[in-house]
Amino acid sequence: MAAEPPLFITLEGGEGAGKTTQIVHLADYLAARGIPSIRTREPGGTVIGTRIRAVLLDPDHAGMAPQTELLLYMADRAEHIQTVIRPALEEGTSVLCDRFFDATIVYQGTARGLSAEWLQQMHELLFAGLKPDLTLLLDLAPETGLARARRQLAQGGRASGEGRFEAESLEFHQRVRKGYLGLAHEEPGRFRVIDAGRDADRVRQDIQAAVDMFLSQRGDKALRS
Ligand code: TMP
């Protein structure tokens, strides 16, 4: 039997949705199913990306122009796709990525107001429109998520000096949530919306169920073709 093609799975969601915890569980779950994977993230999945991340998330850079912000995310992604994502997929290793291009559409597009069409064209031109097979959207009321994320920052649970987006208004984060739910609505075949407002164990179980369903549907399609 031919080996299953590797998966490209992304986790998305607003601040404090629990992606960082859940991606670790997901990697363990896939390993238990015999699917080797790497865990990575945007921004900051490479050495150069780590430096770009520090510039992007520094609260002292509150007034950064939206175009500067966009190009830094794109630069981070260029390095990440070229040196991490594509090589892994080409050697047959699945990739679990904490945020990807949907975050650009939502944060730089819906929330900051840059044209989604323009962002899409850049993604096509630079990255041949690379798309995840499955995107898990951890959906949470921004009031709850922001409180969690700000608490983590205050307790030093995240690298200090990463609070630029946590300092944005509630309205900004409401636009982010709306943007993500809109994308999920447009692409129901790729997105699974997970209620991230419950305890972490329930969220983990829902993610596993979504991945099981995706794998069985993919298996059915392969059998039919
Ligand atoms: P993180 O908190 O998930 O590590 O993400 C860092 C921040 O970067 C988060 O507030 C969302 C933001 N972001 C964008 O604005 N555009 C992007 O393309 C990506 C990948 C992240």
Image (spheres, helix red, strand yellow):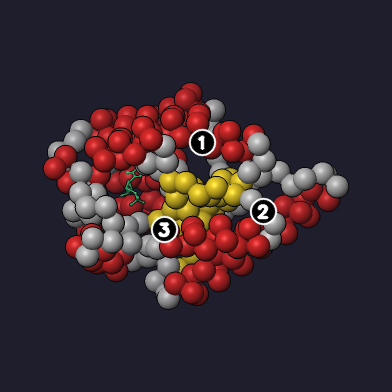
Give the SS element for disc 2: loop
Residue type for callout 1: Val
Query: Residue 20: where, in percent of width, then height?
Result: 41, 58
Dot 1 or dot 2, earlier in sequence = 2
How many numbered discs sit on the rendered protein?
3
- Vertical position of residue 113 compared to residue 149: above or below: above
Q: Residues within 10 Å of mark 3 (few under 14, many from 20)?
A: some
Q: Which mark is residue 184?
A: none
Query: Residue 44: where, in percent of width, then height?
Result: 37, 41
Query: Residue 12: where, in percent of width, then height?
Result: 44, 53
Q: Which mark is residue 20?
A: 3
| Residue drawn at x 29%, y 46% as measured from the top left | 111
Residue type for callout 2: Ile
Q: Is residue 2 visible?
A: yes
Instruction: Assess whether mark 2 and mark 1 are in contact (beta carbons under 8 angstroms).
Output: no
| Residue drawn at x 13%, y 43% as measured from the top left | 60
Say which quarter of the image contains residue 71.
Answer: top left
Q: Residues within 10 Å of mark 1 (few under 14, many from 20)?
A: some
Q: Which residue in the protein does label 1 denote?
A: 84
User: Does the closest atom of ligand 1 sit within 8 Å of the Cβ of label 3?
Assistant: yes
Question: Viewer-proximal residue, 9 or 40?
Answer: 40
Q: Is residue 163 visible?
A: no
Say whether residue 87 is left or right of residue 97. right
Give the SS element for disc 1: helix
Residue type for callout 3: Thr
Give the SS element for disc 3: helix
Q: Residues within 10 Å of mark 2 (few under 14, many from 20)?
A: some
Question: Viewer-proximal residue, 118 or 3?
Answer: 3
